[in-house]
Image (spheres, helix red, strand yellow):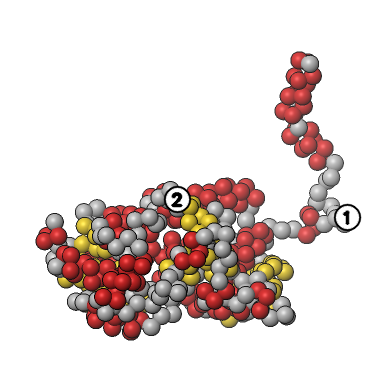
């Protein structure tokens, strides 16, 4: 089987796993390996990634700037849905995988590659996310998943392999964390974090200061929305990637967006992860506030009932599924009037809504006021209550007759 492979396109981050995989595929399959690295805001030295790939044996290296596409076509659609997995996780890794896989498959087609490969382990979610995307694009593509084939079953063994082959990798024995970094978040797994009782060391955090070290003075900011998407911060219009990056800086300096959670992986096990999502945390709070005055009650409640399903689809790797696309169409229809301005206060890890206003606001002060008004007859509430209590009264009457 190995002899049938002539060229592989590898999703390459330059980290421990994919650096070892690059050399392992070359040695195991005796084939040409093209690497693909997506720039989605991880703020790494991508030229060093290029040099490492060439040094490790890549025949060709692709490094594509996908930041704008990532935020506009993947992050923003999920945030229009207020997507959150198990009440805590803002899906930073999950949202990025289908974009990387899609571009990887485009390169494979252009290069005439026989197969594609990734660095996801056989225990995690990413193997599912990558491969469901590959197969949705080309049902016949061959997939090489080294973690399911080789005998290098720990990161300690991978580090030994890297040392033996002279491969430079960022992971060390003192900081053996697996990280994923993009414009939406950075995640940390492994090492001491595998003990769910052990507190995450403060020195692992990259995007945020600790809330205790954040400024003692609150910071106020305005976010403007159009049709469910943020378009400006404090009156300055920004493109999607620049806007999210600025939110990360503002949120990071105020200690916002740290989450320590144990999540349920799609493959069946629980996993402890630590996440930093400063800009996304601010954005979700602002978006919910904007919807609170622009969305009809029943539309909002219907959409909210779909959030767990939408988030689960994204988390489990079904971005390109017909059901996710169907939900997205419905959700985007709800967002047409979600436009206006939200004011927030950021302070020591907290994000508090101060105000919201919109030309499409459904909030009417003359209806909601506790002062005298001429548009709402309070006596009408009596009939409303009696009609809604009818089934409750009937049930109680039956209980009394049987006692």
As rendered, which of 364 and 356 lies closer to the eye? 356
Among the 4 quarters of the image, the one containing residue 124: bottom left
- Residue at the spot 45% in from the left edge and 50% down from the top edge: 269
- Residue at the spot 29% in from the left edge and 74% down from the top edge: 162
Up/down of 165 relative to 393, above or below: below
Q: Is residue 212 left or right of residue 43?
A: right
Q: Is residue 62 left or right of residue 3?
A: right
Mark 1 vs 2, N-terminal side: 2
Q: Quadrant of the N terminus?
A: bottom left
Q: Secondary structure at mark 1?
A: loop
As rendered, which of 19 and 348 lies closer to the eye? 19
Q: Secondary structure at mark 2?
A: loop
- Residue at the spot 57% in from the left edge and 74% down from the top edge: 202
Among the 4 quarters of the image, the one containing residue 53: bottom left
For disc 1, the marked residue is 372
Q: Mark 1 Cα within 10 Å, few/some/many (few <14, many 20+)? A: few
For disc 2, the marked residue is 269
Q: Quadrant of the C terminus?
A: top right
Mark nearest the camera among 1 and 2 is 2
- Residue at the spot 38% in from the left edge and 77% down from the top edge: 170
């Amino acid at each position: 089987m190995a002899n049938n492979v002539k060229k592989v396109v590898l999703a390459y981050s330059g980290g421990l796993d994919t650096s070892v995989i690059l050399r392992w595929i070359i040695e195991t399959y005796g084939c040409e390996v093209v690497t693909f690295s997506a720039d989605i805001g991880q703020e790494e030295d991508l030229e060093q990634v290029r040099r490492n790939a060439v040094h490790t044996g890549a025949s060709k290296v692709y490094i594509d700037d996908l930041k704008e596409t990532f935020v506009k076509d993947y992050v923003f659609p999920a945030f229009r849905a207020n997507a959150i997995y198990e009440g805590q996780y803002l899906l930073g890794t999950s949202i990025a995988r289908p974009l990387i896989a899609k571009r990887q498959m485009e390169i494979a087609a252009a290069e005439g590659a026989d197969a594609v490969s990734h660095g996801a382990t056989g225990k995690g979610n990413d193997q599912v996310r990558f491969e469901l995307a590959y197969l949705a694009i080309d049902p016949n593509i061959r997939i090489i998943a080294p973690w399911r084939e080789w005998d290098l079953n720990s990161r300690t063994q991978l580090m030994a392999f890297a040392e033996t082959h002279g491969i430079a990798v960022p992971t060390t024995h003192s900081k053996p964390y697996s990280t994923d970094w993009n414009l939406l978040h950075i995640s940390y797994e492994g090492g001491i974090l595998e003990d769910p009782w052990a507190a995450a060391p403060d020195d692992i955090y990259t995007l945020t200061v600790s809330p205790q070290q954040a400024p003692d003075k609150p910071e106020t900011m305005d976010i403007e929305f159009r049709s469910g998407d943020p378009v400006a911060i404090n009156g300055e219009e920004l493109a999607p990637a620049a806007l999210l990056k600025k939110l990360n800086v503002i949120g990071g300096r105020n200690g916002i967006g740290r989450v320590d959670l144990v999540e349920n992986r799609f493959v069946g096990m629980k996993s402890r992860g630590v996440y930093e999502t400063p800009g996304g945390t601010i954005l979700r709070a602002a978006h919910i506030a904007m919807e609170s005055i622009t969305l009809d009650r029943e539309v909002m409640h219907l959409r909210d009932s779909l959030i767990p399903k939408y988030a689960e689809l994204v988390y489990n790797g079904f971005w390109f599924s017909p059901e996710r696309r169907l939900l997205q169409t419905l959700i985007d229809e709800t967002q047409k009037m979600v436009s206006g301005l939200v004011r927030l206060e950021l302070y020591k890890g907290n994000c508090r809504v101060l105000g919201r206003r919109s030309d499409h606001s459904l909030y009417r002060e003359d209806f909601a006021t506790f002062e005298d008004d001429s548009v709402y007859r309070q006596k009408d509430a009596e009939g409303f209550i009696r009609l809604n209590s009818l089934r409750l009264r009937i049930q109680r009457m039956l209980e009394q007759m049987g006692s």
